[in-house]
Amino acid sequence: MNIQDTIERALKAAGLNTGSGPMRGVTETIRKALSSAGLGGGAQPSGAAPARRPPADADTIDVVAREVATPPETTAPAAKRPAAEPAPPNEPDHTVEAAETAEGQFLAGNFSAAVGTRAYKLYLPPQVAKAKAKAMPLVVMLHGCTQSADDFAAGTQMNRLADQHGFLVLYPEQAVAANASRCWNWFRAESQAREGGEAELIADMVQAVVAEQPVDARRVFVAGLSAGAAMAVILGETYPELFAAVGAHSGLPYAAAHDISSALSAMKGHSVMGRPHFPGTADDPRRQTTQAVPTIVFHGDHDRTVKLSNAEHIEQQALGAHAAHTAASQAGLRSHTEQGVAPDGRGYTRTVHSDASGQPRVEVWTLHGAGHAWSGGDAAGSYTDSAGPNASAEMLRFFLAQPRAN
C-alpha cells in the first residue's frame, strides 16, 4: 500500500467521501503533491504502453526524485580498469558476467574510477565475435529515473538495432546509493562540469570500453530519456571530443538547474536556475552551450513531467553553439519543417537544421499527443509509447549519418 492509499483510507474512516464533493478536490491535490515528490501514484502517461517494472504507484518518471547525500566511496583503484575486463584476484569490486543470446552477448559488470563506481551492461553484436572484427560505432544509452539498464534496453530495443547495423551499446546504470530513484544527478553543479561528477564517471567508463572493445573512437554517440537525456546533453557539452552526437528524449537543456527546487521548476517550464523564463532578453537566466555537437531531440507535446519548452531550449542552445562556430564563414544552418504521421498513428512535426552541405546538425521531433515516454518503444520496458515514430531508429539514423571526425 502506498501513502496515497493510506491517506484515502484514513479520510474514509473519518466518514469523508473522497470520491465526490469538496473532498474529491482535496484528495486530488494531495495525490498530485505526492506524485511530484516521487511518493504518490496514478496511471502511466496517456498513450504510453503499460510499464513492466516501474513502481506500482508511479505516475511518471521522477526525473529528480529525492536527492541523497553521496556516500563515501570505497577506495578506488589507482588506475582505471577497462569496463569489460574481468576482475583480477582479490578485487571483487569489479566483475563481469556474460549472457549469451542468439543476437549477441550482453555483458554485466562494474566500473570504478576516482569519482565512484557504477554498474553497466554492454551489448556486443554478433559481428564482434567474428575474427578480426572491424572497429564499430558505440551508442551510450542513459536510462531515466526508476529504470535499470535491462529495462531501458528492453524498452528502446537498441540491441536489436545493434544486431542489424553492427554497433555496440553501453548502458551505464545509476546506483541507488547515488540517487534513491536511480535518477542521474543532472541538476548538481559537479555533474554539469567536466571533472568531479557523474559526467566524468560516465566519460571514463566510455573511454575504457573504447580502449578494450573494437570501437571506432570517432563514432561514439550518447542518448538518454528524461534525467538520462539531461545527462546526455551535459556530456555533449563537457566531452565534445568524445561524443560525436547527442540524442535527448524528453530531457532538459544544459545547466537548467542547480538543486532540486530549481530542477522541479525547470521540468515544469516555469523557470530555469530558479528564475522565470524571459528568452532572448537580459533577464534570460539560461547558460549557453559552446560546443557545436550534432543533436537530435524527441519530446511529446503532452508531456506533464518535463514540459515541451525544455526541448525548445535544447534546440536553441544547440543552434546557438553552431552559430558561434560558423560565424567566421557566415555559413549558417538552414531550417526545414515537415508534418507527418508515424505508421502506428502518432502525428509529429520534424524540424531539421542543416549546414551548407546539407548535413543535418540539429533535428527536433515534436510528438503530438505523446506524454513522457520513449517514442516507438517496446512494452517489454517501462515508460514506452508504441505509437511511434521510432525514436531509437531515428536517433541511430541521425548518428550514423554524421561524418567521421578527423
Image: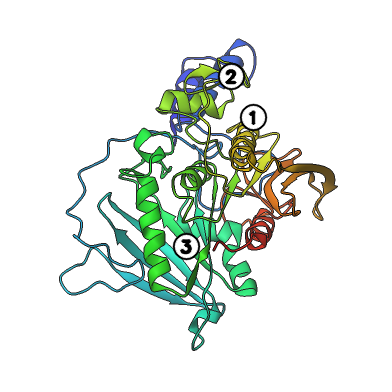
Compared with 300, 84 (above or below) is below
- Could you say which is closer to the camera, residue 337 or residue 63? 337
Label 2 crowd (10 A; few <14 / some 14-19 / many >=20): some
* Of pointers 2 and 1, the one earlier in the residue sequence: 2
Q: Secondary structure at mark 1?
A: helix
How far is mark 2 from mark 1, CA to CA? 10 Å
Residue 208 in the image: state x and y as whole percent: 36, 65
Label 1 crowd (10 A; few <14 / some 14-19 / many >=20): some
Q: Please report the residue visible at 20 percent of the width from the left and 44 percent of the height from the top.
A: 72
Q: Is residue 31 visible?
A: no
Q: Please report the residue visible at 52 percent of the width from the left and 37 percent of the height from the top.
A: 289
How far is mark 3 from mark 2, CA to CA? 35 Å
Amino acid type at image mark 1: Ser
Per the image, the residue denoted by label 2 is 277
Per the image, the residue denoted by label 3 is 170
Per the image, the residue denoted by label 1 is 309
